Image (cartoon, rainbow, N blue to C red):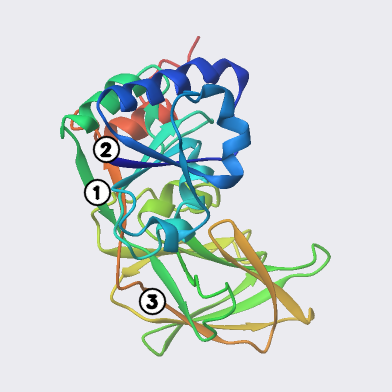
Amino acid sequence: MKIALYGKTLRAENEALVKEIIGVLHKAGAEVTIYRPFLGTVFQCLDENVEYQTFDGCGQLRGNADMMFSLGGDGSVLDCVPLVRDSGMPVFGINMGHLGFLSSVSTDEAVNAVSNILAGNYEVEHRTMVEIVGNETLFDGINYGLNEVSIQHSSYDSLIEVQVFVDDRLLNKYWGDGVLLSTPTGSTAYSLSAGGPIVAPNVTSFVITPIAAHNLSMRPVIISDDSKVKIKVNGRCENYALGLDSRIKLVNKTFEFEIKKADFSFNIVKMPYRDFFGTVRGKLLWGNDVRN
């Protein structure tokens, strides 16, 4: 098995764990290739007797890796999107961050989970992605995301008006800080903090969520993910912030674009004993006695 290792930072308390994981991979005969900017950070965890390959992007991964391990939080998993692109390569997230909906395996479970993966005892979930249509060079050709598309004002001293059309029919004019269009995966991210619903990953839908709407009667709307959504922006500001997951570009308010479901999915590795609702209960502390 060929494993691509991705990460950004590594806390000192996690170094022993990463070294153990790499040792388990070597013992099983797995080949390890490491994201080049991460190499210096993780260097102390590597076996000095092993020569490691490195990669910078998707072009070097095709045919050279079967799975990507993401060491970090959910943000690190999102950073894997531009790396795996449309290759179909599954991503396994080990949560070394905070909440961890995407990187749902904790550090305590990590070694056992890696052993399960090497034994073929794992599942792959196919997650819907969103794609921006209108300017394919805007995000350097990587105009798709896993969580959401965000349309927000670029200056906090002014509001923004976002007109949203679903299949060429006006849904609403949102006046406030902006609007989100999220996938089911993204429903537990920015959309959730903006008051949107939690949507199970296998539901074929998008969620349109206003951000701090000026009109309090505006509520999130769930639409089919087969819909095409058109965005027009008005307001006093000349530019607005267009976000695709954690990537943000300033664009002129005359720029109009469509959002649709991408033609490929993002594949997440999960353990058979994990389920979405159990993760939600655990992360959001549902069922805990809050009276004490």
Q: CA distance from mark 3 to mark 2?
A: 26 Å
Question: Which residue position holds label 1?
Answer: 125
The amino acid marked with disc number 1 is Glu
Q: Which mark is residue 24?
A: none
Q: In terms of sequence position, does the residue under pointer 1 or pointer 3 come before the other?
A: 1
Q: Find residue 223 and report its image quarter.
A: bottom left
Q: Is residue 149 toward the left or the right of residue 117 in the image?
A: right
Question: Which residue position holds label 2?
Answer: 270
Q: CA distance from mark 1 to mark 2?
A: 7 Å
Q: Nearer the viewer, residue 216 or 81?
A: 81
Is disc 1 placed on a helix, strand or loop? strand
Q: Position of residue 27 (x, y in %)?
A: 29, 22
Between disc 1 and disc 3, the foreground one is 1
Q: Is residue 218 visible?
A: no
Q: Residue furthest top?
A: 292
Q: Are marks 1 and 2 in contact (CB under 8 Å)?
A: yes
Specify few, some or many for label 2: CA neighbours under 10 Å numbering under 14, 14-19, or 20 or more: many
Q: Are marks 1 and 3 in contact (CB under 8 Å)?
A: no
